Amino acid sequence: MKPTYHIVSHSHWDREWYFPFDRFRAMLVDMVEDLIELFERNREFRSYTLDGQMAAVMDYLEVRPDRREKIRELVEKKKLFIGPWYILNDEFLASGESQVRNLLLGFRMGKTLGGVMKIGYIPDQFSHIAQMPQILRGFGMDTAMIYRGFGGEPGQEPSEYWWVAPDGSTVLLHHLPKDGYSAGYFGTDDQHVIVQKFERLKQELDARATTSQRLFFNGGDHHWPDENVTTAVRVLNKNYHARVLHSNFPDYVSALKKEVGKGRSLTRLEGETRFGYRHAFSVLGGVFSSRIYLKQMNADCQVLLERVLEPLNVLGIAEGMRTRTPQIEQAWKYVIQNQDHDALCGTSTDEVHREMVVRYEKAKQIGAHVSMECLAHLLPYDEREMKDDRYLILYNPSPVARSGVVEADVEFYRQDIVVGLNPEVKVAVKLPSVDAFRLTGPDGNEISYQVLRKTEGLGITYSKHDYPHQTLVDRFTILVSADQIPPLGWKALTITKETGKRPAQNLVAGESFIENDFLRVGSLPNGGVLILDKRTGSEFGPMNFFEDSGDVGDEYNYSYPLKDESYTSDQFQSNARIVEKGPLRASLRVDHVMNIPVSASSDEKSRSSEKTNLRISTEFYLTPDSRRVDVKTTVQNTAKDHRLRVLFRSGIETLQSHADTPFAVVPREHREYDVSQFPFEHPALVAAMQRFVTIHDKEKGLTLISKGLPEYELKVQDKGVLALTLLRCVGKLSGRDLITRPGGAAGWWTDTPEAQCPGTHVFEYSMYPHGVPDNGTWSSILREVESFTVPLMTLKRKNEQPVLSKSFLSVEPEGLQLSALKEAEDGKGIIVRLCNPVDRSIKGRIRFNQPILKASICQLNEVALRPLAFSKGNTVAVALKPFEITTLKFIMKKNQKSGKKRK
């Protein structure tokens, strides 16, 4: 059959990269204006694809709103192809829910402009998650196009595959050629050059094709449309016995499907794609640790949006509140804009990343207001009450009842603070200091607490109808024993100024160890700690020691200097001491001072002979019932050109890990490589995770949980040692002559001094020892991950509260993961999304506190598939197969007031 070559004109338009956003947008506006003129000037120029992301379209229309109808006309005439994504994000750093919101936004924006391209177009992400086929199918897309992270290995020669997610969802995959989407830009009307360029790529396309259809990418990064492409089509049709079309991705995919559907056999590609180092230098394995501070802010904002704002909005709406979805969506836009693959990966200029920090802060500002408004509706806030705190309210964002220890502030009024000059105001005498108080639950039982500190400070009461009112207060920072806080609900504790009884002590704090009924954490002479799991007798250690080595790479790749020097914290003196002795929390602090090179040498072939002190302080925490050891490490970074990691010697000799990724916990085999076989880029020994990584042998297991620390390594030469990257400090966007990337530069040389990450950094992670993972153990792992990464919340009220205890929704068993609780896209109902991220089937149920009117099972895009039965008026049974994501929509009957009222 005569081959058909689909030449598709496009541009990959990074929203920000080596220029900041507004400079690139100013360029974008000119490019789109020239594209529109080209369509009018050259009728043979059939179509153009604007990078598969709506951001480019919306950014253009923000400057040229008068062009909206013109864009719609071009889309409807199939001359301009837009979407389906809002942003081409990084798949491993963005949560599963972020990727769903990304597509929801993209489809909705595109619908108003004639509709999106229904192809999973993800050509520039550095690697791809296992669950992407399931996500795409959830939006009605059955094809995908990828480049990086795959190819070059035996069996990966073709350009077409069936890509299969862990749950079995399958899409038809096209894999781009070695030069990617930049392979076929002609940029000339010289017939000899046109044939020469086409012939070079034609050989690769012909060798890889599984059908008669060939895809030829005519574009590149920030490229203007190739005005010579129509000349090239005429020249190539004249010179080749082939059909050469100025085409588009949907037409290519349609033609491809027709031939694949005729019984052609394609190779199956299962799960994530994280290799591809022989296909081109394209995996760029250092991006998960560049500018770690951005990853931490991203993780914080995702929890805020997914587990706080959206659920609180639903709870408020159920109680008659006006929706806050528009504000929440604006916060989502800021966060998703930051998840662009050149942004969240930390691979742009300093200007770009400064703007990212501002967007994250904007999302948090929106979150502060929305959460306050939702909680004020659920738990009345009286702006006229300005005296003592009367209630401490514990809110549980999880769909199961939770207990634990939570930090809170309680304030007692001492005196008004006068703001402004008003000689007529007489300030009352300062009241005596408060020495003690009592907390009681809704049942009247006394609640234990531990005072961390007492200070005299300034309190404030905000008002919608007057200026804020400031007061002088006694502020107690306390730890509170939170016992069985209702799922997705709250429990209010009454505060009274009287002496309470001291809680029982079942924590032990010795000279250099802390201990509860389950775990013992003791400091070692070398500065690490030894953890004893008292339930099994298993020991883990030394844990939590530090390794610092040279890094003369760039924002894309870690690269060690030719003559490296590595330091570990056990080479230096450390100091251990007890900080807290209970009764609700014991803490052990270990301080290190590592004397390390101040930077790389001037030629970057070694580390500097000049040294600097790297100060590291770590606190280990145990509460009475905790099964894990929570850790907070503070680093004062004064060095450059280095990588700092915290190491955990588990005693588990394995080369397999299980890593949390969006919607799936995936197994990975760890090995070393003969790097001489990789002329472009050396395979990275590190890997990405979302919230945790688990290792185990036949006797015991260890799970390392983190907040926004996405890079780990399971060491091959030193079996059983997990390394978690804290800092990777480099000074350039893209370097030259890197040992680990001999193929060349990944971008343009730009100095990025802020990527050296100077200053103070705080890292939070947790060590959870457990048994060999089975169904029950996986449930306990997921429970501990939820508890650590989605903390209980506290708020206070100075006025009477009508409902002291309430739950909105519960999900059981614990192994069912709540991924989303949000208002439906159409504004008519509630979306509950559940995920089974591990390899076992699970059955459970969802129970609401009010009756259900209608329930249905939906796709990820919230399009209903079929009705869902419910029982007892408020309960639905669910069953998820391994790795399945399920989306449910509920319309509730008119709210019936419920909850435990104050007597």
Image (cartoon, helix red, strand yellow):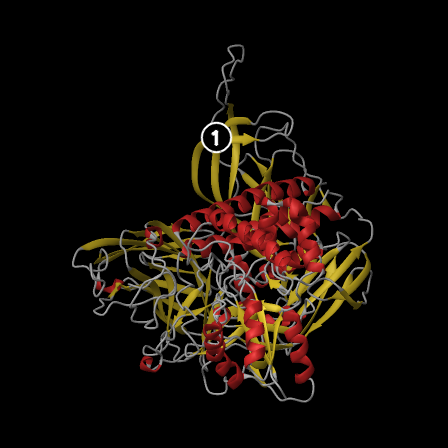
User: Looking at the image, which residue is at 51% across and 26% down?
Assistant: 471
In this view of the protein, which residue sits in the foreground, 196 or 447? 196
User: Looking at the image, which residue is at 56% across and 51% down?
Assistant: 304
Q: Can you give x and y, in whole percent of width and height, for residue 159 in the image?
A: 54, 81
The residue type indicated by label 1 comes to Leu
Is residue 30 found left or right of 572 in the rendered image?
right
Residue holding disc 1: 458
Is residue 5 found left or right of 875 in the rendered image?
left
Instruction: Characterize the local packing of mark 1: few (<14), some (14-19) or many (20 or more) Cα atoms within 10 angstroms.
Output: some
Q: Quadrant of the N terminus?
A: bottom right
In this view of the protein, which residue sits in the foreground, 526 or 6? 6
Which residue reaches farthest top? 424
In the picture shown, does residue 862 fall above or below 808? below
In this view of the protein, which residue sits in the foreground, 865 or 439? 865
Residue 306 shows in the view: no
Q: Can you give x and y, in whole percent of width and height, for residue 520 in the image?
A: 40, 64
In the picture shown, does residue 654 fall above or below 222? below
Find residue 641 and report its image quarter: bottom left
Q: Can you give x and y, in whole percent of width and height, for residue 70 in the image?
A: 68, 51
Q: Quadrant of the C terminus?
A: top right
Residue 60 shows in the view: yes
In this view of the protein, which residue sits in the foreground, 331 or 224? 224
Find residue 143 and report its image quarter: bottom right
Is residue 311 found left or right of 610 in the rendered image?
right
Say how many tags the image has. 1
Q: Can you give x and y, in whole percent of width and height, for residue 546 in the image?
A: 31, 63
Find residue 755 and report its image quarter: bottom left
Which residue reaches farthest left? 609
Q: Secondary structure at mark 1?
A: strand
